Image: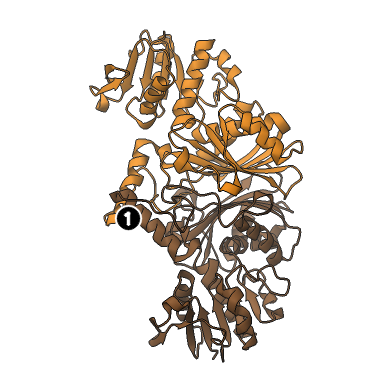
Chain colours: A brown, B orange
Amino acid sequence: MPNVAIVGATGAVGQEFLKILAERNFPVDELRLLATKRSAGKKINWQGREIEVEETTHQSFKNIDIALFAGGSSSTEFAEAAVNSGAVVIDNSSAFRLNPEVPLVVPEVNPEDVKWHKGIIANPNCSTIIANVALKPIYDLAGIKRIVVSTYQAVSGAGREGIEELEAQIHAIANGGEIVSQAFPYQIASNLIPRIDVFGEGDYTKEEWKMVKETRKIFHVPDMAITATTVRVPVFRSHSESINIETERKVSVAEVKAVLSKAAGVKVIDDPTQDKYPMPLYTSDTDEVYIGRIREDFSIANGLNIWVVGDQIRKGAATNAVQIAELLLKK
Amino acid sequence: MPNVAIVGATGAVGQEFLKILAERNFPVDELRLLATKRSAGKKINWQGREIEVEETTHQSFKNIDIALFAGGSSSTEFAEAAVNSGAVVIDNSSAFRLNPEVPLVVPEVNPEDVKWHKGIIANPNCSTIIANVALKPIYDLAGIKRIVVSTYQAVSGAGREGIEELEAQIHAIANGGEIVSQAFPYQIASNLIPRIDVFGEGDYTKEEWKMVKETRKIFHVPDMAITATTVRVPVFRSHSESINIETERKVSVAEVKAVLSKAAGVKVIDDPTQDKYPMPLYTSDTDEVYIGRIREDFSIANGLNIWVVGDQIRKGAATNAVQIAELLLKK
């Protein structure tokens, strides 16, 4: 059984790693929990074991087989040390995702890319994972010519601080009190912020470029036509996306529904007669990517609209990374 | 000076009519406030006058020149009676919008259509108004080949009940207590509901069809290529829209910004270096349509992305109707 380290074990994604390793009965010999100095010494119970959180150092990875990095700056600081110690790093940060030497993997889309790793495998951006799981069956069915995405992203994308900030602001709105904005640049409760991550080329945000460039890499289609507008919404955990797709080949909505219904990692919730469609409140804390509002887009010859929702911390981060680790074990 | 009636005077849009008539110094001789039996007898102060709310009946419109209908079922019940009494009806409901005998007017887009009315002028759907004010200058500059819209619509679209329901749910989340959903089919606080109005043809909602069909009518382009996904978000008053536009002619972002900056009813807020973009919390209770995140869409030859925000009760309803009334007076 592998020895596993979790870097960033006390954060929102790190905590989810612990839950998901247990839920999926991932085989673990030693489990090492690493975090910043501030969290060192904290004791965490996992599967009947009491484990003390240690400060991450370059020496932390001795005898570790798989190191799950939850994200943030620890990846650039410690991933190389982990690889040099002989661990395979599965990294949830954006540091290595577009590095041509590093596979970027969504197990439902490109599991084969795990094979050529050189020590690091990157876990894609949360919105990208959720969109790509939904797009893959449609890509295989009909080809994809162009994608236009507008996202509705939960505060969990900003980690524990994001969740706590929305909670505090909701409390302040209900009971009076000062609205404090630190995790986000403006109040997020009862508001929308159409900017996630920093601005970059063409006035796109980094989050928008991640969706474009990571999707191209995952699908191995370097010139895939895709544009994105990413928006933070006052929702706690699940990301939602309105995706407009132009397919290469004309397909019916019935064909798309049939293919999605059988697809790995996907759950179709689409019954207008029963008022059923995916919503972030009810999909949180689950692993599937939920798809509904599947409609023909009558404005072009081969158009589709879909509405996609997935838990940002689970399939958008921790679950996808643990699935990658499972692929490694199979290999 | 005209005698003016407001039908639905005690609702969210009706109350806004009162504010906007005062703010814009709309000339009013007699002001008659009409509502359902339940609100009759209520006294409302307006510009130093104390006016008693009366129950709307078929006899309510004697000597009325302009009747502003706030929306809902009163339009089908009483609009004809108002016209027969000699009033011009400006109607915020969806009852007459697609009637070929009735002009559908956004003053910044098609003011000339006011001229051919036969007693009723329809006020478009709120999301349609906000989108169309933003689209018109781009249409004039470069032509529009196709539009893909995803909306982020405030609870005010469901009237006073929608606003009160979100307030109550926020209170329940903060302090514990039961979440009650009556105005919306599911909890809206900390959630998104990707269904507004009832489902119709092709599994589009009526709200989505309104955006498609009303935009075509307002622009006099019966085959305009447009598709929409409309989503309710936990925001109080302003609607936001992510709009992807394919223009006929290639234009630069600089040209688009220049034209939008001078356009009637529009305010451009678009400065990534200062983290400035439109947000619904900060645009509420104003009349402009705010546009930001203006970017080239690199996925097609002539593509643009814009982010549009406008107060649903004001420009999306009451202000637009009062502007139509102003056009009538000019005539």
Q: Which residue is mark 1?
A: B173
Quadrant of the frame with the N terminus of chain A: bottom right
Mark 1 crowd level (few <14, some 14–19, many ≥20, 10 Å Cα): some
Compared with B195, A101 (above or below) is: below
Q: Amino acid at mark 1?
A: Ile
The percent coordinates of residue A182 (x first, y second) are: 45, 57
Give left or right: position of B213 versus B184.
Answer: right
Total labels: the figure holds 1
Give left or right: position of A2 versus B86.
Answer: right
Q: Kindly tell me whether residue A251 is visible in this rendering.
A: no
Q: Kindly tell me whether residue B215 is visible in this rendering.
A: yes
Compared with A292, B287 (above or below) is: above
Give left or right: position of A83 versus B187.
Answer: right
Quadrant of the frame with the C terminus of chain A: bottom right
The percent coordinates of residue B325 (x first, y second) are: 48, 17
Nearest the viewer among B9 and A108 is B9
The percent coordinates of residue B303 (x first, y second) are: 71, 43
Element under disc 1: helix
Given the image, what chain letter belongs to the residue carrying mark 1? Answer: B
The image quadrant that residue A105 belongs to is: bottom right
Q: Residue at x 40, y 9 (%)?
A: B85
Q: Residue at x 51, y 87 (%)?
A: A27
